[in-house]
Image (spheres, rainbow, N blue to C red):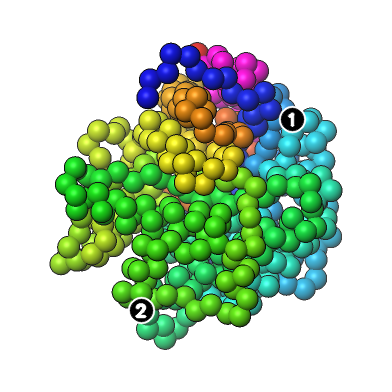
Amino acid sequence: MLHKKLKAFPQDFLWGASTSAYQVEGANLEDGKGPSCQDVKEVPEGTSDLTVCADQYHRYKEDIALMAEMGFKTYRFSISWSRIIPEGTGAVNPKGIEYYNNVINECLKYGIEPLVTMFHFDMPAALDKRGSWSNRESVDWFLNFAKVMYENFGDRVKYWLTINEQNMLTLVGPVIGTLTIPEGCTNELKEIYQQNHHMLVAQAKAMALCHEMLPGAKIGPAPNISLVYPASCKPEDNLAAQNYNAIRNWLYLDMAVYGVYNNLVWAWLEEHNATPEFAEGDEEALKSGHPDFIGFNYYNTATCEWDDGSEELSQAVDQQTARGEAGMFKGFKNPNLPTTEFGWEIDPMGFRATIREMYSRYRLPMIVTENGLGAYDKLTEDGKVHDPYRIEYLRKHIEQVQLAITDGCEMMGYCPWSAVDLISTHEGMVKRYGFIYVDREEFDLKTLDRYRKDSFYWYKKVIATNGEDLSD
């Protein structure tokens, strides 16, 4: 659809950016914080551990002041479960409560709306030892954690996100370092989707509890959504794309919005004797969530072709690499798309297509909770970071958000990844995403000082003009 005139971004559009606790805070065992699964996992060879990260725990005032200088309307950050409740259940850590109170208050001081992610890949290690999401009690663990957050922060936090990228936790858990498979498991697919079921129930109950305890607040999910293209116009490739869309995207949003399992995914699980067991009350709980909006992370689209189930398929190496599922679909490299330095396809137009498809299915307001370009940024001798590639990437994606708004999609905000350089899940510190450069290398902490990248000044202008001026 070509538009002769574009609609403006809404006046209350939430411009901001995102981080996650385990990737940016550091201080991973300070002030009473317990270890999370991220703190005890074996990090990829050649990458830093999470002891210091960007040291935001000690530098949050400086970082938030820089966000305010950019003009942020919102800051999306996550709360570390094990900083609040070191053992995952039981005693609450007052120092953890104090820290997040300070972060929230610092945001509000500058008129920045806190957008809080409740769970971002960091199950407390103590609960990991008790089976993590494999344990049915995980629903109650998470609900208790939610209650503690609502009680302590709900008077000031209006916007909540439940579970970051639950679909990635399910589809590529080993890559992220979050999947626990019990010893002696004979049907791994069933086990994975039972864990996913527990997360879905926990999310629905947390959303319902939010509406009960904080009637003025709004809450939604935050999956990683990538619209899937068929590799060709062959009918079987289109069926494969429908299969992959269902497994990768719609299972999670169908459940969050409607409280029911996607029929294609359920049929596939039935085929493999892998349907999850429902505990008493689960069916009712799943339908009780009623999200107020959809948060979603977008980096690129995916492409696939038909798979006849006759050969072994390669599995994903990260969140954005096309994968395969025997008899359902096979990942296909899209020849029409350029890639980043780290091999991720770049598809701004697919961003618009993804937004349009989500809005047509769910008719809820949406906020982009991640979108960004990881690159090898370099600090010059005079303290500059020239990142025209990031500006170009973000410009093209913001243009597509405005086109989607003009298409009639309801967009609440845009929070690219990331506000400040942080430890990337797979590539460590060298893969930088932030508007703010952190002076450290993979193993040399250097000064940890902050520097404004060129993209910092560009995004400041974008926000000041409410998306009207995207020029260099």
Asked if residue 258 lies in the magenta stretch, the reply is no
Q: Amino acid at mark 1?
A: Ala
Per the image, the residue denoted by label 1 is 65
Q: Secondary structure at mark 2?
A: loop
Question: Of the numbered discs in the image, which one, if any, rests on residue 273?
Answer: 2
Q: Position of residue 445 (x, y in %)?
A: 59, 43
Q: Amino acid at mark 2?
A: Asn
Which residue is painted at 73% across and 68% down in the image?
A: 144
Mark 2, other Cα within 10 Å: few <14 / some 14–19 / many ≥20: few
Q: How many residues crowd mark 1 within 10 Å: few (<14), some (14–19), many (20+)?
A: some
**Is residue 459 within the magenta segment?**
yes
The residue under the point 31% across, 74% down is 271
Residue drawn at (34%, 38%), measured in percent from left and top? 345
Residue 51 in the figure: left or right of residue 216: left
Give the vertical position of 161 relative to 407 (above or below). below
Q: Specify start and end residues of the magenta stretch as a single range.
A: 449-470
Q: Camera-side residue: 426 or 7?
A: 7
